[in-house]
Amino acid sequence: ALSSVVLLAGWMRLCSVPLSSLSVVPLLLAVGLSIDYCTHVAHAFWEAQGTPGQRATRALAARGASVSLGGVSTALTVSLLAFSGTAIMTTYHVMLSGVVLLGLWHALIALPAALLLLSPAGGGSGDGRGGGAVVSTMQRSKAPPLPARRGSAKELA
């Protein structure tokens, strides 16, 4: 998320968009959209089995098209703002175009590469949930399942 905001600040400089109350709203949206795009790919990587390279490939195969189509649909929606003559809408067009481009770049290129490099060579943990450099440092406990809830919501209240 921080990387998206930093790169979007560079996008603002490239497109001559000043930092103002009009450009701050898309900056905040950049955090949410980038996390949204990346979460789908990271979850697919987490669930995949095999070597880190196989897991990255499977993650992109499983979720890459969906994430791409989400970005394309957002870009198509934002493209309509380009035809407006107001400063608000043109600023939003420029900023949200950068948000979509940078969010997709993070999710489809930077994140799989980072996951590939940071994952241990042994692959997943064998429990169907994958694993990774961060996950492998945590101790996964075999906690007992939560007890089943009895009764309806009214009875519990």
Image: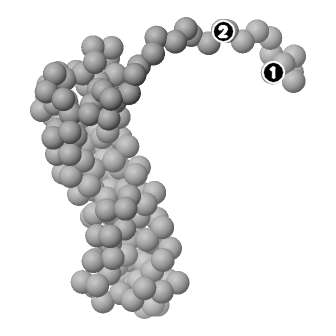
Q: Residue at x 25, y 43 (%)?
A: 65
Say which element carries label 2: loop
**Percent position of residue 24, x then y:** 48, 77
Q: Is residue 106 left or right of residue 147?
A: left
Foreground: 81 or 107?
A: 107
Hey, what amino acid is under mark 2?
Pro
Sequence-first tag of 2 and 1: 2
Q: Quadrant of the N terminus?
A: bottom left
Determine which residue is flagged by label 2. Answer: 147
Determine which residue is flagged by label 1. Answer: 153
Vertical placement of residue 5 versus 66, above or below: below
Q: Residue at x 37, y 62 (%)?
A: 2
Within 10 Å of disc 1 (Cα), the crowding (few <14, some 14-19, many 20+) is few
Q: Is residue 66 left or right of residue 152?
A: left
Say which element carries label 1: helix
Q: Residue at x 72, y 12 (%)?
A: 149
Q: Is residue 113 visible?
A: yes
Vertical placement of residue 141 versus 54, above or below: above
**Percent position of residue 121, x then y:** 13, 27
**Percent position of residue 32, x then y:** 45, 57
Within 10 Å of disc 2 (Cα), the crowding (few <14, some 14-19, many 20+) is few
Foreground: 58 or 82?
A: 58
